[in-house]
Image: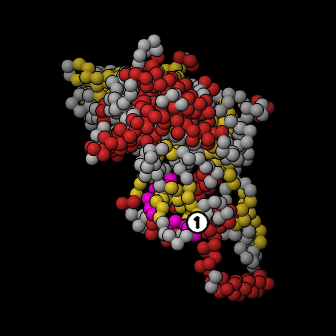
Amino acid sequence: MIEVRSIHVDDATMSVTIPYSFDCYHKNGSLARRLDVGVELRSHFTFSNSENKLLAFGCDTQVFMNATEYRFGSGCISLCGENLNMSTETSCSGFGCCQTSVPKHLKNLSIVMGSINKHIDVNSFNPCGYAFLVDQRSFDISKMRLDFLPEQVENSSVLLDWVVGKQTCEEAKLNTSSYVCGDNSDCHYLENGGGYGCRCLEGYKGNPYLKNGCLDINECLEPEKYKCSRCQNTMGGYKCKCPLGMHGDGKNGNCRGFSFTTIATVIGASIFLVIIALLLFYDYNRRKREKIFKQNGGLVLKHQRVRIFSKAELAKATNNYSQSNFIGQGGFASVYKGVVLNETSTTATTTQQIAVKKPKLDKDDQNKSILMNHQQFHEEIAIVSQVNHKNVVKLLGLCLETKIPLLVYELVPNGTLSQHIHTKRSSSSSAMLRPWKTRLRIATETAQAIDYLHSLAHPPIIHRDIKSTNILLDENYTAKVSDFGASVLIPPGQTGIATTVQGTLGYLDPEYLTTGTLTTKSDVYSFGVVLVELITGEKPISNGVRIKAKSNNIIQYFVSTIRENKSERYVEKIVDPDVIYDEDHEKEIEIVAELAMKCLEGHSERRPSMKEVVEELVELNKVKGNNKAQQNEEETYQLLIVDHD
């Protein structure tokens, strides 16, 4: 399995991790070895010939790579006579380390290594040799030592080139239905990948695979880079005027002249500007507040059916965002609980619990953080402002007085579904989820919320980060879907969106991960993982799986167990030991397990829609006597919890 570290749309590359090869010798024979590492890529991926190198590291080490597809072979030998100090090295210079280039068009690669003298001459300090395929930009030889053992060595980062189509640019543009480059972008042919990719035009940046993904760069915000003091931004470029009193082309530094007429003009303009500045000074504070309010979309947002909070009001409600009120955090924001007074026309004073989503700013690059959080804020507002469903966390209001606006949600007091599933058995809160009927109900409520996003919201919404930590439970243990920070709106007439891969490892749709195309079926896959979590009580990826699986991936174990035991009872092999169920429930668990299998299909077209998932779960909840049985089970466990406390 190849681990993906990062994907870059700007230069059509992907950083992945592949294992290294090694052999270790001892005076009495071999200690350990992994001599042969083979990697084969899919058709749209190719090893980068410009950035990758094959390295041999050691004092008696030879490495050879070959690719049968191109009848290619190459290698090198690394020798040294003493324990060199590699911490001062910045490159693989030949002593204790050798390297060779990787050819173009390489899609499969076999790496074989060995030792000429089995490290006999240098065994006292160097019993091992290593072979790496590395991205030379990220590999740091100074962190290696010639006396390292295998457990002290990390796998290497390798760069892959990728293409979105195997045609030339001319061929791709002829087929408008499959051509994927968006506005303000252009096609470029990648010789190493044997296909085409997309790049934003000069003067634009962003994701060229989205229709409106390439946005204009405002060069005027970076005067030092573009060396223009009087800048006027244009779409895809900028104009640079000469300083007052001069003429010519300011962009090329070709400004000339300065006359007495110009001096008089400058003096007159300066006096005028001083007068204007004095007038503006008295109005500064009011204008500053209005500017921030407008920048945050206040003119539009104040007409939404949400409450506008002041900065001071939320600081007081959260005790100035004290650590004792901290609930959790995500990639862009931290969440704090608080209490505010209800807006009411009566004389009675009531309070309401809230959750304040406060954006995080990167201290090293606050301008970039503000820009990213502004975009994140407006995307989330566009989504949550139109959502109204009992199983979706409700937006109560906004604060528009800060550089990045604050979002105020209803407080859902009983934590996340993940906390309840994975807490210890003795916990009173986790005991509420022991009845099977409770877990079935929570699964149904979650599915109904996702189906609402897909089918009833206008435009439809893809959540993109469905997981048990984003499913909250209220005081009645009713499920509420939260965190729309990664969500996207589906444009009219489209079923999928080409976008940067984002989500949580273990819940990510494998088809979305490999193609970059996000669809509603991506949410279906993630929900399938949540169903497995509810049935098994295990995290998708865990180092401590209670069920004795062959790997720490519970999804692989779940799928293989059901397939291998199709003709016999398998519920007891997969169900969470904490779950309370009887023989009548076994058939329901089997139906939900089969439904999870459908949701986890590798090809999205084979998965059911969320509407079909909801129909099947609702039908299970309608079975005669279920509602009464569920109520009795939950009341029994509430009594047990009280008695236990």
- Nearer the observer, 597 or 627: 627
Q: Residue at x 62, y 54 (%)?
A: 385
Q: Residue at 39% x, 63% y: name it.
A: 322
Q: Is residue 337 magenta?
A: yes
Residue 193 vertical position relative to residue 327 in the rendered view, above or below: above
Residue 226 versus residue 202 in the image, above or below:
below
Residue 235 x/y as whole percent: 74, 56
Pick the residue in front: 567 or 43. 567
**Magenta residues (range):** 332-345
Residue 461 horizontal side relative to residue 365, left or right: right
Rendered image quadrant of residue 60: top left
Across and down, in percent, residue 494 comes to 71, 38
| Residue 78 in picture, x, y percent from top left | 37, 29
Splitting the image into 4 quarters, where does residue 581 fall?
Answer: top left
The structure residue drawn at horizontal position 31% and vertical position 40%, both measured from the top left corner, is: 640
Looking at the image, can residue 557 be seen? Answer: no
Q: Could you say which is closer to the camera, residue 569 or residue 168?
A: 569
Q: Residue at x 36, y 60 (%)?
A: 324
Q: Horizontally, is 256 left or right of 97 in the view?
A: right
Magenta: main secondary structure:
strand
Report the number of numbered marks: 1
Residue 68 magenta: no
Visible in this render: residue 475?
yes
Check disc 1 and report the residue beneath it. Answer: 308
Disc 1: CA contacts within 10 A as few (<14), some (14-19) or many (>=20) = some
Kindly give the residue lying farthest to the top in the view shown.
Answer: 567
Q: Amino acid at mark 1?
A: Ile
